[in-house]
Amino acid sequence: MGIDAHAIRVLILDDSQNHAERLVSLLRNAGHATRAHRITSREDLQESLQQTWDLCLACPETSYMTAQEACQIISQAHDVPFILLTDQVDVDTRTEAMRCGMQDTVLVSADSLIVLVVKRELTNLTARRQRRIAEQSLRETEKRCQLLLDSSVDAIAYVLDGMHIYANRSYSRLFGYDDADDLAAEPMVGLIAAKDQHAFKDFLRHYATRGDQSELRCTARDSEGKEFPIMLSFSPANYDGEPCTQVVIRAETASAEFEEKLKAMASHDLVTGLFNRSWFQEQLDHISEQAVHNSQPSTLAYLSIDNFNVLQSDIGIGGSDLILADLAQILRRFFPENTLLARFSDDACSVLIEGKEPEAITAQLGELLKLVEGNLFEANGRTIQITVSIGVSCISETHPEPTLAIERAHRLAEQISQAGGNTIKVFNPLEELAQQANRGNIIALIRHTLETDGFSLQFQPVISLRGDSAEHYETILRLFNSQGEEIPSAEFYTAALESGLAMDIDRWLLAKAVKLLAQHRSKGADTRLVLSLSNASLQDPEIVQWISTLLKESRLSAEALVFQFNDAEANHYLKHAKVLAEALHSIHARIALSHFGGALNPYAILKHLPVDYVKIDDAFSRDLSTPAAVEQLKEMVTTLHGQGKLTIVSNVSSATMMPTLWQAEVNYIQGDYLQPPADSMNFNFSGE
């Protein structure tokens, strides 16, 4: 098993090896990959400190040094949280420990409290390290910014209380000064023509409260008294640690009005007239600053149209655009005029409500749900009814990250849409903590299962409808907890990706499956296995070499393997997937793409990814009771065949599907109706 990139490195000060192993086991069971070292002498501690450590757990005294001595040595040049574990904790003991530089004192028998204190200190350590990196990056960035400012062709200055504190060369030359120092004692208003000075002063006082209206046209005056039109652009800034105003000046041209129109077009979605995604995200950065500096919370709502793909297939792209335009009108009428509204994606709009927390607008959003549900939309001469799912999150002083707020709201909207939609869900930090804790337990279970070789493999036949003599099985990985209950694959793979264990799982699956396949083929069977790879393996540059070595050791041809990528993940990591697919093809392995058809332009990926098999998403075969659904499936199969792809339909659940799939000329079928996943490759292909 590979080394976890997120493993914590722990020093343990204790004479007892058993005590040290108990602490390591405690941390691992809590979901931490742990690399530990037990200190055996003062010299050993000094030598160990040549490396980087994340934590020190210490008993009060050992045969070679006390905890206070160890803490003093460590703290001289290293930032390592030091936690004292004692048999008895009182106020004096804890006070003395903290006075010596230790972070906390905990009862050695209080396992749950130890885990919580460790988690707190690791979080604090990560924050301190990130702050130091950020400070260094800030210093480097400031140097680069200063160089850019000095050499910029734009006229840029920084103004504090109306006085120049910096002006670049372009700014000085614009006003006829040879040296920027000549402007140091010059108030900016002195560079403005007398007729515009009053308007300039008023604008400078109030521009920060005018939102995006931070530009002013006026007439400037150079050092010789010559007047010329300019455009001033103001924005809050810091210079040498002082809060000030950045001023960018450009001379006005005849095309100024045209530039304004271009700017408006660049910030708006042409279909709905709402702001577009990029402009919306830019505004969120400003909202995040307000949340941090002014403790002003804002609410982000993500509105996703339920079953949008089905709607678009039914009424076409033009019809769905009409629906989106009408939905935008509803949003404009429903929310106050200054509310920030945007079309965030093909099927979703986003709303930012400043100065309010989610609890204050939940009832209002409930009214919006009813309004949308009760509205009769018109498209292509038809009356359409839709519903939306709304995920809600908060941008606040404690949760200022706008990207995280969007992800949370988007995730919630997707969850409720998949559950039926037409409802609201507000992000709850306590639920998130509970889920993280649950994922932590799963991570510990995954690590234990990998270490004990405890995963279970099952095989489901993939059956040819077109006379292919080769036998195909899809390999399915199962994970069970200590009570024998199966953990859903989506749940444990999510935890594995978060903890850096997904690649280890992929390699375990490959190694086990190749070994079993080699044994099975040695009996004369022409069997191929379909093996799914996670996005961790898509990004692993060494995976193909590892697979080649594995196949040589097993004396198995790569032609017996079909490596399967998830369509959504392959799209997200398309460059990596393309390189990997081409490399696997070079060793004569085959490639399959699963869950195909969910993207807006599903065939685009096939121009870049050299796949042999395409497994059509269940949404296209789940209900074949209508002529439209059957025709849609047939059209997709025909298009894929035209591109030289073999098609697979999975989740075949009844005999009634078989004639339709045959008539649609699907190449392969798979599902519990034919045979549920089994512990061995024992399906009778010749009997079908």
Image (cartoon, rainbow, N blue to C red):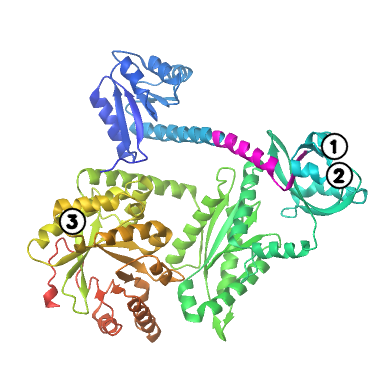
Res 431 label: none
Tag 3's secondary structure? helix
Q: Position of residue 323 (x, y in %)?
A: 57, 75
In the displayed structure, 111 sits above or below 368; it is above
Is residue 128 among the parts visible in the rendering?
yes
Residue indicated by mark 1? 186
> Looking at this view, is 282 or 195 the one in front?
195
Q: Which residues are magenta?
A: 136-159
Label 2 Cα crowd, 10 Å radius (few <14 / some 14-19 / many 20+)? some
- Between discs 1 and 2, the one toward the N terminus: 1
- Position of residue 526 in the picture relative to residue 583 (left or right): left
Q: Which mark is residue 514?
A: 3
Which image quadrant for residue 613?
bottom left
1 and 2 marks in contact (CB < 8 Å): yes
How far separated are the C-alphas under marks 3 and 2?
A: 77 Å
Q: Residues within 10 Å of mark 1 (few under 14, many from 20)?
A: some
| Secondary structure state at the residue bearing disc 2 | helix
The amino acid beneath tag 1 is Glu
Mark 1 or 3: in front is: 1
Residue designated by label 2: 191
Name the quadrant of the N terminus. Answer: top left
Q: Decide which of 355, 483 is in the foreground and name it.
A: 355
The answer to which of marks 3 and 2 sits earlier in the sequence is: 2
- At which x and y percent is residue 681? 14, 64
Residue at the image point whose x is 66% and y is 67% from the top: 332
Is 436 displayed left or right of 165 in the figure?
Answer: left
Please state which of residues 604 and 293 is positioned toward the viewer in this rendering. Answer: 604
- Work out which quarter of the rendered image holds the C terminus and state it: bottom left
Q: Earlier in the sequence, mark 1 or mark 3?
A: 1
Amino acid type for the residue under numbered disc 2: Leu
Question: Dot 3, how many residues are within 10 Å of its Cα: few (below 14), some (14-19), or many (20+)?
Answer: many
